[in-house]
Amino acid sequence: MRIGELARRAGTSPRALRHYEDQGLLAARRLANGYRDYSDADLRAVEEIRALLADGFALEETRPFVECLRAGNETAASCPDSIEGYRRKIAQIDDYVARLLRSRERLAAQLAMARDTAEPPGAEPADGPPRPAVPPQGIPGCSLYPPQTR
């Protein structure tokens, strides 16, 4: 398939595909007329790249997964380097969530002090009821609150 069809089927742009090729993540065969020719395996690789990017991986971090597919494995996650990539990304996310929770706790404490000094007794807080400082049960280290509107 040509680059436009691959882009359409993968939900991306020809420019992104050329970038993946420049980075060595995608290797197109060239036809006699110079057009790039992609296979279903290339489509699978692009789908994997896009899914990993959506999950927070940097483009270079997708390389072990693409190489796993190129090696003939049925899934991109079945190779040791891919598994290690998942472990690293989960550790990064856990660290980021922990930092966000610490920031949230500091901000909540500042807000509580500000309320004590700025709002008359019995007044409804301007931003609604206070939220608990503890994350919800079920997802360790995660706090999924909807954004507050004023």
Image: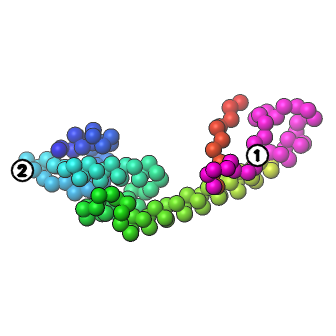
- Say left or right for 10 vs 112: left
Q: What secondary structure is marked by label 1?
A: loop
Report the coloring of the rendering. rainbow
Residue located 41% across and 53% down the image? 52
Q: Residue furthest right?
A: 121
Residue located 68% across and 54% down the image? 101
Q: Is residue 109 visible?
A: yes
Q: Which residue is mark 2?
A: 32
User: Which of 138/102 is in front?
Assistant: 138
Is label 2 or label 1 in front? 1
Q: Is residue 106 magenta?
A: no
Q: Amino acid at mark 2?
A: Ala
Q: Which mark is residue 132?
A: 1
Q: Residues within 10 Å of mark 2 (few under 14, many from 20)?
A: few
The span from disc 2 to disc 1 (Cα, nearest Å) is: 65 Å
Residue located 71% across and 30% down the image? 150
Q: Residue furthest bottom?
A: 80
Q: Is residue 132 magenta?
A: yes
**Quadrant of the snapshot with the N terminus:** top left
Residue 17 percent coordinates (x, y): 28, 49
- Which comes sooner in the sequence, label 2 or label 1? 2
Range shown magenta: 111-140
